Amino acid sequence: MDGTPAAPARNLLIDTLRAFALIGVYMVHMFEQYEIYWAAPNQNLTHTIFTTFFMGKAFSLLTLCFGLSFFLLMDKADRRGTNFSGRFAWRMVVLALIGLAHSLVYRGDILMVLAPLGLLLIAFYRASSKVILAVAAILLAQPLLAFQIISAATGATWANAAPHHWGDTGPAFYRTAPLDQMLTWNVWQGQSFKWWFFIETGRLFQILALFLIGLSLGRAGVFDAPERFVRQRRRALVALIVVALLARFGQAPLAALLPDATAAPMARKLLGNLMGGWFDVSVMGVYVLLIVEAYQGVGRKLLERLAPMGRMTLTFYVLQSLIWVPVFYGFGLGAWEWLPQGTALWLGVGFLVIQGVVATLWFKRFHYGPLEWVWRAATYGTVKVPFMR
């Protein structure tokens, strides 16, 4: 035991970034009707806006913040002369258990993916920054996906086989499934399709890369003293904009060099996964840098109003599903059928405002959000974690 853990000092910039990740992920879920939308997607303007500017970007920011949080926990323990590795591993077990319970209601739960992958961060904590960034770069390059593209283009049968996750029947199933059938289906079938998606699209490598980048940024103190990195930030902003534009508009010229769908059914689709992943990560990086730039300027007071939400990311992430899945799904109100998508999005915005107010009021009396306190208490194996102020 490390003694009774005190409530940590807060970095409001980091909490603000977490809030943006939470907001983005939630609004994507509302757009998707918690996945039901994909049973019959509508290629309209809303679809284009969300798939271009939000989908994949908010998730990327969430994973970046995860790696950053890992560093903050490990570094704080180091400063106390404590090795936090074993306790962090247990912390990931607890997170996976929370995710397991959450995934019964919403199979798209990301906690069950982040937790086991988070264990791999322990091996990199004491690695040099050069090693960490080199591994992150290799992971972002997606060598396995690139190899599959080449194999598909040269006619390899295995590389041109339809991905397993294409057979996902979940979105249509959730429209009408009774609660007991949904819970049973989510235990195995729903999870298997989710994991195939992360494996076959290269998302697992992307998550690990962003974990490592978050670790590296935390070690460098980029968010502790952002005023020291103004020049580097602005150079990185230009570079990421260029990468985003190349990933977005360079796909078509590259696809033209590959065989068509008749000769190689998967080659161009795999290329889309590769370039799409680079686009998501680079746009997320642009968002982060713009947020930091605004935070360092006239936008600080406004942005800090979001920080309380960032301190309750876990609680709100789970709560959102518990409220809205029964609204959209067939076992509940079945709103996927009668609630217009635009109306749902505006309801989502209103619900975010409520969350912001609740979080602000909550932290006037409490140190942690409810699930954050449970997670921390379970991590340290004690209920003496301070809760009420």
Image (cartoon, rainbow, N blue to C red):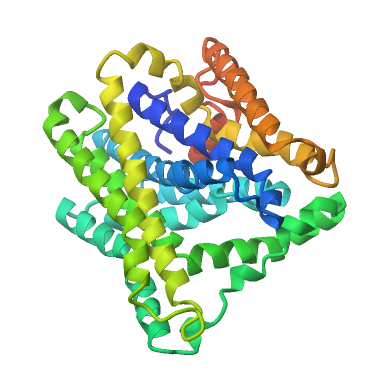
Q: Name the quadrant containing residue 225.
A: top left
Q: 268 or 94, which is in the foreground?
A: 268
Q: Is residue 165 above or below residue 286?
A: below
Residue 329 visible in image: yes
Residue 102 location (% of width, % of height): 66, 46
Residue appearing at x 25%, y 20% in the figure: 296
Residue appearing at x 70%, y 55% in the figure: 40
Q: Is residue 237 left or right of residue 316?
A: left
- From the image, which quarter does the N terminus lie in? top left
Q: Name the quadrant containing residue 355.
A: top right
Residue 376 visible in image: no
Residue 250 location (% of width, % of height): 31, 60
Q: Name the quadrant containing residue 7.
A: top left
Q: 149 or 229, which is in the foreground?
A: 149
Q: Is residue 329 left or right of residue 207?
A: right
Residue 294 location (% of width, % of height): 30, 22
Residue 325 location (% of width, % of height): 73, 41
